[in-house]
Amino acid sequence: MLSMTMEKVKQATLPKEKEVREGSSLLARKQALTFEDVNIYYGTHQAVKNVSFSIPERAITALIGPSGCGKSTFLRSINRMNDTIAGARSTGVIQYDDVNLLGQEINTAALRKEIGMVFQKPNLFAKSIYQNMIHALKFHGITGKDELMYTVEECLRKAALWEEVKDRLHQSALSLSGGQQQRLCIARALALKPNILLLDEPCSALDPISNSKIEDLMIELKEEFTILIVTHNMHQASRISDQTAFFLDGILVEYSETNQLFTNPLKKETEDYITGRFG
Ligand SMILES: Nc1ncnc2c1ncn2[C@@H]1O[C@H](COP(=O)(O)OP(=O)(O)OP(=O)(O)O)[C@@H](O)[C@H]1O
């Protein structure tokens, strides 16, 4: 059973010096997750290769890189979603509090409560907005009507959706627009009071206005949560993230504060990617 609270998150191992520039504030921040030599395989194919770095808490970290470079695979390893894929296996360490998330003893239901995930396409049930919000809470033993309603309202407010749905909580979640559905997925993840939110291209199917609402929401949520976001959209990464990790062919090429990575990258491959020379 995981027993973790953010208060107990340790001053984790610092990133390897070569991956972070001197004087970077990344070195001074408290780390929420530390990756050490993470390798991920699908059968004999290695999708993620020897990745080591740390993610500071209460900040947004963007994972960028061309299609197929391993971003989603890497993200899914954090809450063990890769366990559901036949033939997938991971080695190395993902340190969270006192626990190696890649260890054998992990209770994945407890882990996914602490580390919530939102996918590219909203994955709501064909049930009401309210039922979607309380489903996982009930699974985790919360059944009191007042507590459920309090959490539903609190999380819909945090996800900037309450005003739009407060009069239609018992209507189908599938009657919402794509952007509203995605904010409902975020609200639903928040209901379990996670410490970390993993977002796998949450805006790729959205119109520009919905996209911008989700970006504003991310910036508000980072006051309370540690956020990792996979995005194809480099403008989005540069607008909302505090630090960015650039992956290429399964390798972490560069990890820097976002404005430095986009204005003054250390590696030629990073420069070629952000200037659109490939990918
Ligand atoms: N379920 C799977 N089974 C086998 N191979 C997979 C599976 N999922 C991903 N891969 C392979 O792993 C590599 C990394 O894929 P992944 O989806 O993580 O990349 P990505 O950077 O997120 O790509 P995209 O931006 O297109 O979503 C690719 O070579 C891909 O073909």
Image: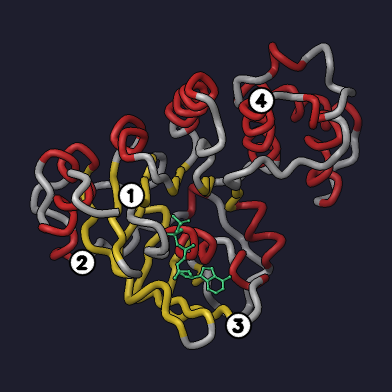
Q: Is residue 136 above or below residue 151?
A: below
Q: Is mark 3 within 8 Å of ligand 1?
A: yes
Q: Which residue is mark 4?
A: 180
Foreground pick, 140 / 66 = 66
| Marks 4/2: CA–CA distance | 40 Å
Rendering coords of residue 5 (x, y %): 55, 51
Image quadrant where one finds the C terminus: bottom left
| Marks 3/1: CA–CA distance | 35 Å
The circle drawn on residue 245 is none
Q: Which residue is mark 2?
A: 16
The answer to which of marks 1 and 2 sits earlier in the sequence is 2
Q: The residue under label 3 is which amino acid type?
A: Gly
The answer to which of marks 4 and 2 sits earlier in the sequence is 2
Contact (CB < 8 A) between labels 1 and 4? no
Q: Which residue is mark 3?
A: 87
Residue ID at (19%, 37%):
259
SS for dot 2: loop
Q: Is mark 1 within 8 Å of ligand 1?
A: no
Q: The residue under label 4 is which amino acid type?
A: Gln
Q: Nearer the viewer, mark 1 or mark 4?
A: 4
Residue ID at (69%, 24%):
177
Rendering coords of residue 76 (x, y %): 54, 61
| Marks 1/2: CA–CA distance | 15 Å
SS for dot 4: helix
Residue ID at (80%, 25%):
175
Q: The residue under label 1 is which amino acid type?
A: Lys
Image quadrant where one finds the N terminus: bottom right
Q: The residue under label 2 is which amino acid type?
A: Lys
Rendering coords of residue 90 (x, y %): 49, 78
